[in-house]
Image (cartoon, grey):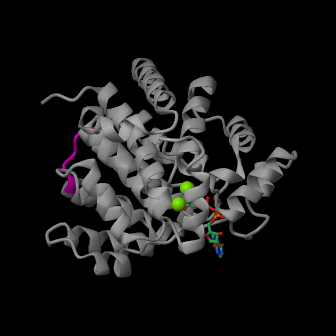
Amino acid sequence: MQISLRDRFTGSILGVALGDAYGAPYEGGPLERLLWRSLGLFKPGTIRYTDDASMTLTLIRSLIEDQGVHQDMLALRWAAAARWSRGYGPSALRTLKRIRRGADWRQANIHDYKDGSFGNGAAMRVAPIGLLFHHALERCDEAAEQTAVITHAHPLAIEGAKLIARATAHASDNTPPVAIVDALQSAASAEPYIERLAIARQMLDEPVDLPAVRQQLGRSIVAAESVVTAIWLACSHMESTFEQLLQTAHAIGGDVDTIAAMAGGIWGARRGRASLSSNLLERLEDCEAFEHAAENLVALHLQFLESD
Ligand code: R7I
Ligand code: MG
Ligand code: MG
């Protein structure tokens, strides 16, 4: 079956939002879960998304408005949209608040950690870059880095964002799962990613072993301990339903919303919107906004293709 570009873009962005929203109630320890269960119930019948999908949506709107990555504008837009109630990473929220108060992102991003944060916050929001530049992987890398560094200057956070962007790009080109991991292994340069991608590649040939996934790939909010987990999750569930992917994300535990969001973006880019169930979509907060943004991203992609 032919899957259109529009179906792949909307599938990917809705995949991010669904993974995030349906993963959030399972994230972290008992206290975090309790807090999210009360925050997440703000509208009856609606599943609330968190920082992962919020920053993804703002990134798409910024790409459209600015006709590409404009770092200073993007920093201001992310800062303006940040709300603690969306469950931001602690340092990321402080960085965005500093930018909101007038600090330059080039200083704000190294205030808490001198080399910058190595959290997974840069990778969780990068799917739009993979879609927009899926025809030009070097530009994809460059744009992923430009978006990452605004809040996450650490090389491991940046490489994590590049890997998720590339994985999304390959998936949107209909690359089969094993070939996605092979391509990422050739692209990776930092040891933690090279090692984990080799393990993930091997795991694709074996039955799913969740304790091994948790131990060897990781499940934390640190980029190096969640990016490859998400890539494995998407690639090992490429022929499964989205609900099955979510179920495995819940069972892995840890940073569930983010692992499911990153995996959901990759899965949706290959499988397309038509493979997402309407049961899940019906309850997603702001579902139309994500879909509309993804459609605008298709138009920008086509515009870039024409001018190349
Ligand atoms: O990376 P970030 O935006 O967090 C994203 C996560 C996702 O799970 C979201 O769903 C949301 O829940 O948060 O936020 P940061 O605060 O930049 O980084 C996350 C955490 O990584 C920090 O709070 C630290 O615990 C850790 N961390 C570091 N620890 C020591 N040294 C990040 N960088 C460092 C570091 O340099
Ligand atoms: Mg989150
Ligand atoms: Mg998270």
Percent coordinates x, y for residue 169 in the rendering: 35, 43
User: Relative to residue 289, is residue 91 depicted above or below?
Assistant: below
What's the residue at 25%, 32% (across, down)? 274
Q: Is residue 64 magenta?
A: no
Task: Examine the image and state in which quarter residue 201 appears.
Answer: bottom left
| Ligand 2 image position (quadrant) | bottom right
Give left or right: position of 174 versus 111: left
Percent coordinates x, y for residue 208 in the rendering: 20, 71
Percent coordinates x, y for residue 187 in the rendering: 37, 58
Task: Between residue 127 and residue 240, name the one nearer to us.
Answer: 240
Task: Between residue 291 and residue 247, name the one nearer to us.
Answer: 247
Residues in magenta?
Answer: 173-177
Percent coordinates x, y for residue 96 in the rendering: 75, 51
Give left or right: position of 245 versus 222: left
Quarter the N terminus occupies = top left
What's the residue at 74%, 70% (across, down)? 114
Q: Residue furthest right?
A: 102
Task: Between residue 236 and residue 111, name the one nearer to us.
Answer: 236
Quarter the C terminus occupies = top left
The answer to whether residue 293 is visible is yes
User: Relative to residue 142, is residue 7 depicted above or below?
Assistant: above
What's the residue at 47%, 41% (across, down)? 45
User: Relative to residue 103, is residue 210 depicted above or below?
Assistant: below
User: What secondary structure prevails in the magenta region?
Assistant: loop
